[in-house]
Image: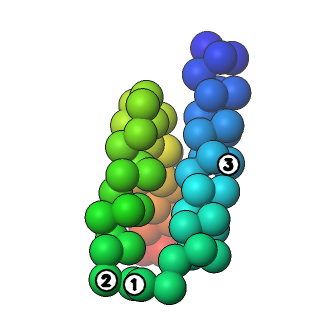
């Protein structure tokens, strides 16, 4: 369980670093969407992106429920 937590945090950091590096070196913004998708679908990142999306959906659900 602790490994999933550590790997999720590490993958978030890796994704942020890859995207900032891509935006720093890229002057052509035509294919940037495809490059960002490649960053998200590298190796085992899809599993951790799924975990992140589930956590975000719970946060949004509780914020929406609290606003009623």
- In this rendering, the label closer to the viewer, 3 or 2: 2
Asked whether 45 or 26 is in front, the reply is 26
Who comes first in sequence, dot 3 or dot 1? 3
Residues marked 3 and 1 touching at CB (< 8 Å)? no
Q: Measure how far apart labels 3 and 2 are at the Cα level.
A: 25 Å
Q: Residue at x 43, y 68 (%)?
A: 64
- What secondary structure is found at the residue carrying circle 2? loop
- According to the picture, the residue beneath numbered tag 2 turns out to be 30
Q: What is the image's colouring?
A: rainbow
Which quadrant, please, contains the N terminus?
Answer: top right
The location of residue 33, given as percent across then percent down, is: 33, 71
Who comes first in sequence, dot 3 or dot 2? 3
Q: Could you tell me if residue 31 is visible in this image? A: yes
Q: Measure how far apart labels 3 and 1 are at the Cα level.
A: 23 Å
Q: Residue at x 59, y 74 (%)?
A: 25
User: Is 50 placed left or right of 13 in the picture?
Assistant: left
Q: Measure how far apart labels 1 and 2 are at the Cα level.
A: 4 Å
Q: Residue 67: which disc?
A: none
Residues marked 3 and 2 touching at CB (< 8 Å)? no
The location of residue 11, given as percent across then percent down, is: 59, 40
Q: Residue 13: which disc?
A: 3
Residues marked 1 and 2 touching at CB (< 8 Å)? yes
User: Is 4 placed left or right of 2 in the picture?
Assistant: left
Please say if 4 is above or below 50. Answer: above
User: Is 61 placed left or right of 24 in the picture?
Assistant: left
The location of residue 61, given as percent across then percent down, is: 41, 57
Please say if 12 is above or below 62. Answer: above
Q: Could you tell me if residue 50 is visible in this image? A: no
- According to the picture, the residue beneath numbered tag 1 turns out to be 29
- What secondary structure is found at the residue carrying circle 1? loop
């Amino acid at each position: 369980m602790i490994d999933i937590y550590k790997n999720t945090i590490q993958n978030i950091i890796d994704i942020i670093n890859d995207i900032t590096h891509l935006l720093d070196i890229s002057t052509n913004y035509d294919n940037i969407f495809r490059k960002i998708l490649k960053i998200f679908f590298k190796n085992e990142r899809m599993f951790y992106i799924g975990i992140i999306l589930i956590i975000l959906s719970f946060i949004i659900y509780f914020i929406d429920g609290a606003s009623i």
